[in-house]
Amino acid sequence: MESKSEAILGGVTKRNYQDPTLAFKVNIGFAQPKTSRSQKLTERLKYLKERRADKDLEKLARTQQLTIPLDKVKEEWQESVAAQHIKTVAEHYGVFQHLYGDAYFFPRVMLGVRYRQQGDDCFAVVHRGNVIKPAEAAVMPEVSYKANPDSLWTLLLTNLDGHLMLEDSEYVHWFVGNIPGNDIGKGEVICDYLQPFPPKGTGFHRLVFVLYKQEKRMDYGSFKRQQPCLCLEERTFRTQDFYRERQDDLTPAGLAFFQSDWDPSLTDFFHNTLEMQEPIYEYDFPPPYIRPQEWFPLVQPFNTYMDKYRDEKQIAKEYLLKKLKKTHPFRKPDPPPKYPHAFRMDLNLPSWLRVEKKKERLGWGRVIEHS
């Protein structure tokens, strides 16, 4: 017998089914190096055998003196399965789908990005999907990666969710091309850095760093912008079109991305930097369904049942008047009691009214909504 959850999952799977012959994904990055699984397994078993035979290691672990070199662990992870893990996380966040459509790549070059904060040794590090506030990303980040000094690279930072006018477009926040090796400072700045500015009410935005390996020196004259570029229309960008025209000369190699949502610092940024009114969005939720009112509703609490069909403004007005009765215009409000239920409740009151008073004392329910 199929359970309800299995039936729902099966229905969703059928609804989202795509023909693999038509909706296949293309790897546009560097090929994955071929490694022998048997050789890797042999090396792993040999390493485990050596560790188990190490008496000093066992003693350090037993006496809680064993330290793990995290730098070496991270380095080994980057050399082994990091590219696969980063690709999986990026697919989970829909990064490849919204950057390239039916294409993906394995990030073979580990891209390090961090934003310096007010303290000299304090950084907001970009990983893969972590949250960084706009105030923390206000200045140009520090970018690092390993590269041959004779190679050329392109670095792009785009916002996949932030365009204010076009649904299928991005804003380019930073564009540096023809970077010799890993020296970002010597690259050609096509579009200067602009901090994230997710408008209020739009939730989290994905800001993606993509590092491209160039086959030759590129001409980005059509993307060159006057600095500082504060016109959002000029920062309109589509990664898919950009890469399609240059796919023979560019290969995506590195990836890092973070999420950012609105914070109070953006009000000043919109007004004084972009010199525009701050856009504020609010989702218009459909009204909840309420079944038609009945003359004699069975098994329904009459106090809350009647409120379903009343005007919310009238209910809020009643709570406000009740609050104003206890408010003195020239005195501070009385502090709430430490133990609200320590005060005696009149047992002659009906049960529903006693419950309402208990909720009011504890600050539960509608008291919070209309306070």
Image (cartoon, rainbow, N blue to C red):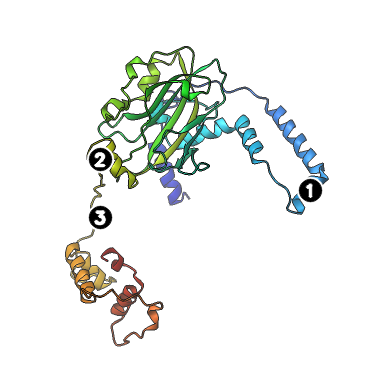
Q: Which type of secondary structure does the marked residue at label 2 adopt? A: helix
Task: Please state if 332 lies on the left or on the right of 219 as rendered.
Answer: left
Classify 10 Å Cα crowding around label 2: few (below 14), some (14-19), many (20 and above): few
Q: What element does badge 3 sit on?
A: loop
Task: Residue 40: give x, y in percent of width and height.
Answer: 70, 30
Name the residue beneath numbered marker 3. 288
Three-letter code, disc 2: His
Q: Residue 241 at x, y = what percent?
A: 35, 20
Q: Which amino acid does label 1 sit on?
A: Glu
Q: Residue at left 79%, top 43%?
A: 52
Residue 27 visible in rendering: no
Looking at the rendering, in which quadrant would you find the C terminus?
bottom left
Above or below 32: residue 95? below
Q: Where is residue 174 in the image (x, y as percent from the top left)?
A: 39, 28
Residue 345, placed above or below residue 40 = below
Circles 3 and 1: CB atoms closer than 8 Å: no
Check if mark 1's residue and mark 2's residue have beta carbons within 8 Å: no
- Check residue 104 in the rendering and tell me which mark sits there, or answer none: none
Front-most of 342 and 105? Answer: 342
* Viewer-side residue, 279 vs 359: 279
Whether residue 70 is visible to the viewer of this picture, yes or no, is: yes
- Name the residue: 33% across, 38% down: 197
Between the C-alphas of marks 3 and 1, the distance is: 62 Å
Numbered badge on residue 58: 1
Callout 3 crowding tier (Cα within 10 Å): few <14, some 14–19, many ≥20: few
Please name the residue that numbered disc 2 is placed on: 271
Horizontal side, residue 236 vs residue 216: left or right: left
- Which circle, 3 or 2, is nearer the viewer? 2
Quick check: marks 3 and 2 in contact, CB under 8 Å? no
Furthest-top residue in view? 216
